[in-house]
Amino acid sequence: MSSQRSTSPTTIRHSGRCLIRGKIRRVWRERSLSLTDAGTLRYYDTDTHQKYTLHVQSARILDPTTFRDLHVGLPISTYGFVMHASRMDREARDFLCAVPTLEEAQMWVVALQWASRQNPSYLSTSSLDDFHTVERQEVIESQRSMSQSVESIS
């Protein structure tokens, strides 16, 4: 579970092995991840078989002492992080991950947050919320200006 750098055409910014909890069976399995300089995350089910490429939208450290993360149930002697990511053909979902040290979890989160900023076309939920808030404010302002113009006419 260590970090590596490569000088290949697609440079690997961060890579390593971690435990990832499955979506359906919720079993923790060891997987390999490689973050490229293009900001995409390669997800491997074995060291050589790439399962898919992910576009990271957000990442954060898991804190099992909070109500928000209490349900996760990290494996013993591990530290967790969660990333919200999507495949090209699928809706985004949370990937629960665990590594042996807090430092490693923090390194993954920093790298994944960097990746989320490299893919602006993949808006995170918070970005969409901000977009809808601005959109709502514009509608309210246009309604105000319309009502003011109606009042000035009458």
Image (cartoon, rainbow, N blue to C red):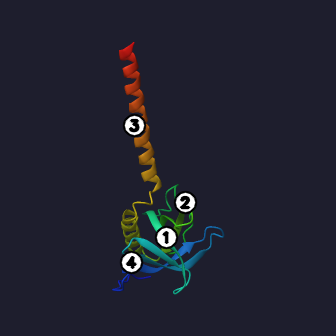
User: Mark 1 and mark 2 in contact (Cβ < 8 Å)?
Assistant: no
Label 3, residues with CA under 10 Å away: few <14, some 14-19, many ≥20: few
Element at badge 2? loop
Report the residue marked by disc 2. 70
- Of badges 3 and 2, the one in the foreground is 3
Element at badge 3? helix
Report the residue marked by disc 1. 54
Q: Which sits earlier in the primary sequence, circle 1 or circle 4?
A: 4
Looking at the picture, how far across and down is residue 18, in whole percent? 49, 77
Report the residue marked by disc 4. 14
Q: Is residue 85 left or right of residue 104?
A: right
- Of badges 4 and 2, the one in the foreground is 4
Looking at the picture, how far across and down is residue 90, in whole percent? 57, 64
Q: Amino acid at mark 4?
A: His
Which residue sits at x=44%, y=82%? 1
Q: Amino acid at mark 2?
A: Leu
